Image: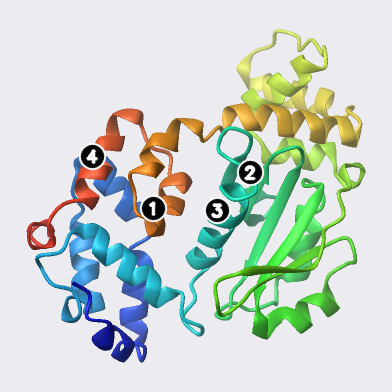
Amino acid sequence: MIDTAHTRKMVNLATDQLAAISRLFSSSVVREMARNGRSPLFSRLVTQSQMLRSISLSERVCTVFEAAFSLLKREGYRHEYIYKAALTHKILLGKHSLQTASMINEFRVGDCKADVAILNGTATVYEVKSERDSLARLERQIAAYSTVFAKVYVIAAESHIRSVVNSVPDFVGVLCLNSRHQISTLRDAADQPERTSPSAIFDSIRTDEARMILSSFGVCVPCVPNTELYAVLRDEFVKLDPVQAHEGMVRVLKKTRNLLPLSALVDQLPLSLQTAALSVPLRKVDHQHLVDAVNTPLKDAMGWA
């Protein structure tokens, strides 16, 4: 079992320990477990994190993830993953569901990467600013995201809230992740699809998705060589009305980025690992490998390295 007294002592984590604990939730660990049913990286990170001081080898791998998640939820240590997990559980799976909404992590917009985008009746982006983040790039990020998403939110640590509220435009919503891991809304985001840009939307989605959006509006794309297809699609796409382009993006990406096939997998994973599983493209044949790896006795998993 987890020694809670010892876990409390681990609050004074060294930088390298904290980095190792954070990396447990990385796509690299999830991919290794899903592909092979084991992860040498996981074993190395557990050693580097020194978490075995408070966890018995008789426990399972899932116990490590749950303990790591608890540590990362502490103020001062809250990693970006903690904020993404809060959005996953309280908004994607709380207000919506995998049947009605889709979530995209690290969605590229121009030279920025949006932390989390949720597509439901509209497209909403969430930029995470944890207590470990700087606000230096926030203005540029908001400017980019507002060309693709009708609703823009910043979810920030309490220490950042005053600066965020004072620096972002009025149409941007502001959320706070408090010390109790609850999300509070300080300001709602305005839903303004008319503010978006068809050219920016086109540059942020895949070519096949752009073709599907155009087809849904009855736009016939001429048959051209693949070398010319991108330019032809773009020429047609930028002719769309901003509201039309945004509506088409939401409708098509909810299908192409659908997470419903992961529903059964998510139900078999600990809460701490569900966001990671929803963030990494996984083949259905690999789902059971991940479940088996997470339920492996820790004494066996430490031999993966």
Viewer-closest of 37 and 299: 299
Q: Which mark is residue 27?
A: 1
Q: Amino acid at mark 2?
A: His
Q: Nearer the viewer, mark 1 or mark 2?
A: 2
Closer to viewer: mark 1 or mark 4: 4
Between disc 1 and disc 3, the foreground one is 3
Q: How many angstroms separate mark 4 from mark 2 (CA)?
A: 28 Å
Select label 3 or label 4 by which is in front: 3
Residue 59 in the image: x percent, y percent?
Answer: 15, 64
Res 136 label: none
Give the mark nearest the N terminus, 3 or 4: 3
Q: Secondary structure at mark 3?
A: helix
Q: Amino acid at mark 1?
A: Ser
Can you identify the residue that label 2 sits on?
Answer: 96
Give the colouring mode of the picture. Answer: rainbow
Foreground disc of the pair 4, 2: 2
- Indicate the secondary structure of the residue bearing disc 2: loop
Quarter occupied by residue 272 = bottom left
Q: Amino acid at mark 3?
A: Thr
**Mark nearer the N terminus (1 vs 3):** 1
Find the distance from the CA under tag 1 to the CA under tag 4.
15 Å
Q: Is residue 26 visible?
A: no
Give the labeled residue for mark 4. 289
